[in-house]
C-alpha cells in the first residue's frame, strides 16, 4: 500500500516537474526572443556612448527610486512639516469680539494666569498628567518587568498567560472602558462587592471626586500593566541559555539570576525604554473621554486639549495650540538630552 | 499517580523558596487573568439578559432562555450619525483594512529602496524616521485637526492618505528585514531583463509578504479599535468603535444596556477571530518588534 502511494506520488511528481520544466523553457525562449531585439552590443560602443548609457540608466533608476519615495514624502511634508509649522501661528492667535484675528501672547498669558486660580482645569490637567505618568513609570513598569521575567522563567501556565495578557492590547479601549465603567457603575458587580465586603452602599467609584482619580489610576494599571510585558519577554528571550544555566550551576537562586544575569544583560534595552518613557511626562493620561468626561477631578492634558479643540471656540483652539506648543518646548530638549544618553548606552557583551 | 508526577515536574530544579515564590506569583497571575477575562464574560452574560433581569442583579447569570434577540436588536437599534450597524461595520472594515494595506505596501517598498539603493538623501530620509520615533515632536493636536479639515479629507475615504505615513517602527523592521535579503535575487532578475519595479514586485516583495501580513494584521487591529481618529475626522462616517461609544450616551438615557453589550461583543468578534487564527504569528512578531525596539 505504502509503495503504491509512493509510486503515485512519483508519477504525479514527474508530471508536475515535466510541466514546470516545459513552462520554464518556454518562458526562457520567449524572454530571449523579446530581449534579443533590445540587445545592444556593448563592446561596439565608444567610451562616450558607454558613459552616456550608464548615465541614462542611473537617471532612470533615480526616477524610479523617487517615484516610490514621493508619496510618503508628500505625506511627511503635509502632515508633519506643515502641521508642525502651523502649530506656531495657532498658539499665538486670538480673535477679538468683532471676529478679528490678532497675534500675541494672549493664550500663554491666559494659561499662566489661570494656573494660579483655584479650580483651574489647566492646573488639574497638568498635575493629573504628571501623576498618571509617574504612576505608570514608577509602579506599572517595574511590576510589568517582573511579570515579564517570570513569564520568561516559564511560570506554570506561562503560554496561556501570554495570550491573556495580550487581551488589553487586542480589544478596543472603547469596549474595555465600557465594561469597566458599567462594572463599577451604580448596581454593577464591583459596587455590589464593595457593599458586601465593606458594607458601604452606593459607592460611585467614577462619579465621586473622592474615588474617581484613584479609580482612573487603577484603570490605567489594570489595562496598561501588560502592555510592555511582551516586549520585556522578547528582550529576556535574547539571553543565551548557557549563560543562565552556568549561573544556576554556580548556585544562583532565581532572584540572583535576575540580579546578576537578566538585569545586566537586558539593561541597555530597559534603559532605552525608560528614557523614551521620560519624553511622555506630559502625555500621561487616563481614559477621561471614555470613563468620566473629565468630571470629578479626572482631567488630563490630552483630554483638555481635545475638548478645547473639538468643542471650543476659535479662541479655545488657540489655547489648545499654546498648550501643545508648551508641551513641545518642554519635551524637545528633554528628548534630545535623552537621545544623547541613549547613544552612550553600550550593549553588554556575552 | 501520573498526574502527581507531572505536578511535581513543575517544581523540578527549584529550591523551596522558589517554589513558594512561583506559587505566590502564579496565584497573582491567575487573579490578574481572571480580572482581564471576567469583564468580557460579564459583558457576554449581560448581553443575554432582558433589561429587567440586568437591573435586578448585574452579578447574576442570565436565565434560560437566553435573550439572543438582543443581538438582532443591536443590529437594528445601534446607529450613529445616521449610520446603521452594518454601515459602521463597513466603515471599520475599509478604514482598518485600507490603512493596513496602504501602510504595509508603502512601508515595505520605502524600506526596500532606502536599504538597497544608494542615492543622495538616503541617510537623511532614514534619519528622519529615527528622529521622529525618538523625539515625539510634531504637529499639535489642534494644528493637525485644522489641517485635516482644511484639506477636506475628513468624512471621506480620502482619510486613508494619512496611512501613507511610513515613518515609524515598521520602517525600521522592514529596513532591517531587507538588510538580510541577498541582492543576488535582484541581480538574477536583472539578468533576466527585469526592470526596477519587476525586481521589487517579483523578486523582493514576495519574500516580505509574511512580514507584511503579520505587521499589517497589527495595523488592522489597531485601526479597527481606534476611536480617536474616527471620532475627530470621520464624524459622519462612524466606525463600529466610535458608533458604540456614541451609542453609550443613548443607552444611559433609555437603559437598554443588554443591547449595548450585545453590540460591544459583536465588535469584539472579528478581532478575536483574527487573533484565534493568527495568534502564533502575531505573538512571534511582537517578540521581534520588542527586540528591535
Image (cartoon, helix red, strand yellow):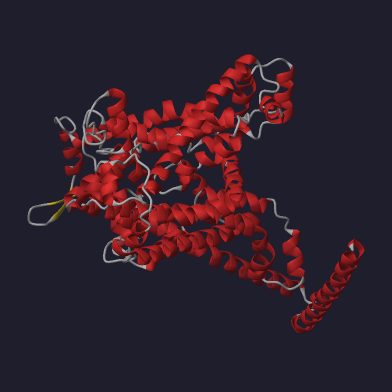
Left-right relation of A312 to B110: left
Q: Quadrant of the C terminus of chain B?
A: top right
Q: Position of residue B65 (x, y in %)?
A: 38, 53
Q: Position of residue A42 (x, y in %)?
A: 79, 75
Is residue A341 visible in the rendered structure shown here? no
Figure quadrant of residue B38: top left
Viewer-proximal residue among B120 and B226: B226
In the image, residue A307 sits, relative to residue B210, either above or below, namely above
Q: Position of residue B71 (x, y in %)?
A: 37, 59
Viewer-proximal residue among B41 and A304: B41
Q: Which residue is the extreme one toward the right? A: A3
Q: Quadrant of the N terminus of chain B?
A: top right
Left-right relation of B211 to A287: right
Q: Position of residue A182 (x, y in %)?
A: 30, 42
Q: Residue at x 48, y 62 (%)?
A: B97
Is residue A71 visible in the rendered structure shown here? yes
In the image, residue A309 sits, relative to residue A261, either above or below, namely below
Viewer-proximal residue among A201 and A57: A201
Figure quadrant of residue A124: top left
Q: Residue at x 73, y 68 (%)?
A: B190
Left-right relation of B80 to A77: left
In the image, residue A107 sits, relative to residue B224, either above or below, namely above
Amino acid at each position: 500500500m505504502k509503495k503504491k502511494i509512493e509510486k503515485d506520488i512519483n508519477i504525479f511528481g514527474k508530471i508536475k516537474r515535466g510541466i514546470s520544466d516545459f513552462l520554464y523553457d518556454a518562458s526562457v525562449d520567449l524572454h530571449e526572443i523579446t530581449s534579443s531585439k533590445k540587445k545592444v552590443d556593448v563592446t561596439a560602443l565608444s567610451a562616450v556612448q558607454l558613459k552616456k548609457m550608464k548615465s541614462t540608466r542611473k537617471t532612470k533608476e533615480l526616477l524610479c527610486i523617487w517615484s516610490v519615495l514621493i508619496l510618503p514624502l508628500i505625506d511627511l511634508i503635509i502632515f508633519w512639516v506643515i502641521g508642525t509649522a502651523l502649530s506656531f501661528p495657532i498658539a499665538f492667535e486670538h480673535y477679538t469680539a468683532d471676529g478679528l484675528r490678532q497675534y500675541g501672547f494672549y493664550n500663554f498669558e491666559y494659561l499662566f494666569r489661570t494656573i494660579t486660580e483655584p479650580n483651574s482645569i489647566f492646573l488639574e490637567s497638568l498635575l493629573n498628567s504628571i501623576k498618571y505618568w509617574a504612576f505608570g513609570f514608577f509602579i506599572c513598569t517595574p511590576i510589568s518587568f517582573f511579570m515579564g521575567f517570570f513569564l520568561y522563567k516559564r511560570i506554570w501556565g506561562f503560554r496561556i498567560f501570554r495570550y491573556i495578557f495580550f487581551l488589553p492590547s487586542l480589544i478596543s479601549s472603547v469596549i474595555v472602558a465600557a465594561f469597566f465603567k458599567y462594572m463599577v457603575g451604580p448596581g454593577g458587580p464591583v459596587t455590589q462587592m464593595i457593599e458586601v465586603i465593606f458594607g458601604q452602599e452606593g459607592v460611585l467609584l467614577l462619579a465621586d471626586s473622592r474615588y474617581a482619580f484613584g479609580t482612573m489610576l487603577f484603570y490605567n494599571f489594570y489595562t496598561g500593566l501588560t502592555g510592555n510585558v511582551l516586549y520585556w519577554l522578547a528582550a529576556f528571550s535574547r539571553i543565551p541559555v548557557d549563560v543562565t544555566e552556568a549561573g544556576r550551576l554556580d548556585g544562583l537562586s532565581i532572584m540572583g539570576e535576575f540580579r546578576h544575569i537578566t538585569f545586566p544583560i537586558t539593561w541597555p534595552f530597559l534603559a532605552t525604554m525608560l528614557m523614551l518613557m521620560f519624553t511622555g511626562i506630559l502625555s500621561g493620561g487616563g481614559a477621561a473621554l471614555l470613563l468620566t468626561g473629565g468630571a470629578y477631578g479626572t482631567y488630563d492634558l490630552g483630554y483638555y486639549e481635545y475638548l478645547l479643540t473639538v468643542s471650543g471656540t476659535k479662541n479655545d483652539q488657540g489655547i489648545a495650540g499654546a498648550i501643545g506648543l508648551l508641551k513641545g518646548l518642554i519635551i524637545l530638549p528633554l528628548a534630545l538630552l535623552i537621545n544623547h544618553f541613549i547613544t552612550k548606552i553600550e550593549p553588554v557583551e556575552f | 499517580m501520573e498526574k502527581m508526577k507531572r505536578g511535581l515536574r513543575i517544581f523540578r530544579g527549584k529550591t523551596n523558596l522558589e517554589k513558594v515564590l512561583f506559587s505566590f506569583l502564579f496565584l497573582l497571575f491567575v487573579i490578574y487573568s481572571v480580572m482581564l477575562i471576567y469583564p468580557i464574560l460579564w459583558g457576554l452574560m449581560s448581553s443575554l439578559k432582558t433589561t429587567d433581569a440586568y437591573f435586578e442583579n448585574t452579578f447574576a447569570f442570565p436565565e434560560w432562555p437566553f435573550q439572543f434577540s438582543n443581538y438582532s436588536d443591536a443590529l437594528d437599534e445601534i446607529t450613529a450619525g445616521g449610520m446603521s450597524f452594518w454601515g459602521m461595520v463597513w466603515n471599520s472594515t475599509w478604514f482598518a483594512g485600507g490603512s493596513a494595506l496602504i501602510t504595509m505596501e508603502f512601508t515595505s517598498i520605502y524600506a526596500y529602496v532606502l536599504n538597497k539603493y544608494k542615492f543622495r538623501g538616503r541617510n537623511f530620509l532614514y534619519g528622519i524616521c529615527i528622529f521622529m520615533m525618538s523625539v515625539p515632536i510634531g504637529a499639535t493636536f489642534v494644528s493637525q485637526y485644522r489641517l485635516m479639515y482644511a484639506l477636506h479629507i475628513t468624512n471621506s475615504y480620502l482619510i486613508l492618505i494619512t496611512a501613507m505615513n511610513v515613518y515609524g517602527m515598521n520602517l525600521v523592521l522592514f529596513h532591517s528585514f531587507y538588510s538580510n535579503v541577498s541582492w543576488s535575487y535582484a541581480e538574477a532578475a536583472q539578468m533576466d531583463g527585469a526592470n526596477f519595479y519587476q525586481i521589487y514586485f517579483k523578486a523582493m516583495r514576495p519574500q516580505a509578504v509574511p512580514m507584511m501580513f503579520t505587521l499589517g494584521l497589527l495595523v488592522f487591529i489597531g485601526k479597527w479599535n481606534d476611536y480617536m481618529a474616527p471620532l475627530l475626522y470621520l464624524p459622519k462616517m462612524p466606525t463600529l468603535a466610535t458608533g458604540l461609544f456614541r451609542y453609550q450616551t443613548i443607552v444611559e438615557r433609555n437603559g437598554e444596556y443588554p443591547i449595548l453589550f450585545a453590540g460591544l461583543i459583536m465588535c469584539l468578534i472579528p478581532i478575536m477571530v483574527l487573533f484565534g487564527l493568527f495568534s502564533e504569528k502575531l505573538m512571534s512578531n511582537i517578540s521581534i518588534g520588542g527586540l528591535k525596539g
